[in-house]
Amino acid sequence: METQPQPSSEPPRETQSNADARVHRLNARVAITVALLATFVGICKVKDDNIVQAMQQAQADRIDQWAFYQARNLRQEVADATVTELELASSGQSAAVQAHYAPIIARYKALAADQAQKKAQVQQQAESDARLYDALNYRDDQFDLSDALTAIAIALLAVTSLTEKDWLFWVAMVPTALGALMGLAGLVGWHLHPATLTSLLS
């Protein structure tokens, strides 16, 4: 009596043509994603370089303004000290001598007041430059995070292409999406800044 062949309990294996088609689709997705990421990184790089240049200018301006502040502060102190010396020298003198000292004292008082006013203006400008630097640095951090995330994504995509694992492609989409989000935040000016992660990388 002939025995009937038993149906196999194993699922049918993927045929070679189906496997080739799957790998081809996977590699196509990887190639397209890498090309889009590279283009996006290039755009972000241009913007980030401009921001870095603006940061350098703001930093230089802030240093210059504080130098001007110190110079005007020194001039004010010298003028105040001169007024004090002239007032002491004129005290107890005759009316004629005091009248001679009066316009000189007034001139140095005016000089001290003028330096105090200009010193305050310079201080405001220095503080404005500092705020500008901080604002630009905020956006620079966004681009730095975008660069790091897209680099991780591209590395994962390279491993995906080598191992031909579909699931690894979707894992790579996580840093891809986050990198694109941070890059767009830097380009558009969104208030998105993971301070904890940034402080760890700083």
Image (tube, rainbow, N blue to C red):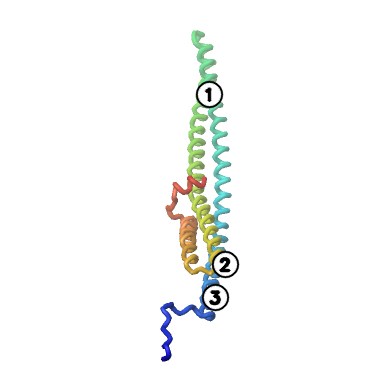
What residue is shown with label 1?
77
Q: Where is residue 145 in the image (x, y as percent from the top left)?
A: 50, 53
Q: Where is residue 148 in the image (x, y as percent from the top left)?
A: 53, 55
95 versus 125 height, above or below: above
Q: Where is residue 192 in the image (x, y as percent from the top left)?
A: 43, 53
Q: What residue type is labelled 2?
A: Leu
Comes first in the chain, label 2 or label 1: 1
* Camera-nearest label, 3 or 1: 3
Quarter of the figure with residue 31: bottom right
Left/right of residue 140 with respect to residue 2 in the rendered view: right
Residue 35 visible in this rendered orientation of the protein: no
Specify few, some or many for label 2: CA neighbours under 10 Å numbering under 14, 14-19, or 20 or more.
few
Residue at 57% over, 61% down: 42
What residue is shown with label 2?
162
Comes first in the chain, label 3 or label 1: 3
Comes first in the chain, label 3 or label 2: 3
Left/right of residue 8 with respect to residue 82 in the rendered view: left
- Circle 3 — which element? helix
Front in this rendered view, residue 111 or 73: 73
What residue is shown with label 3?
24
- The N terminus lies in which quarter of the figure? bottom left
Specify few, some or many for label 1: CA neighbours under 10 Å numbering under 14, 14-19, or 20 or more.
some
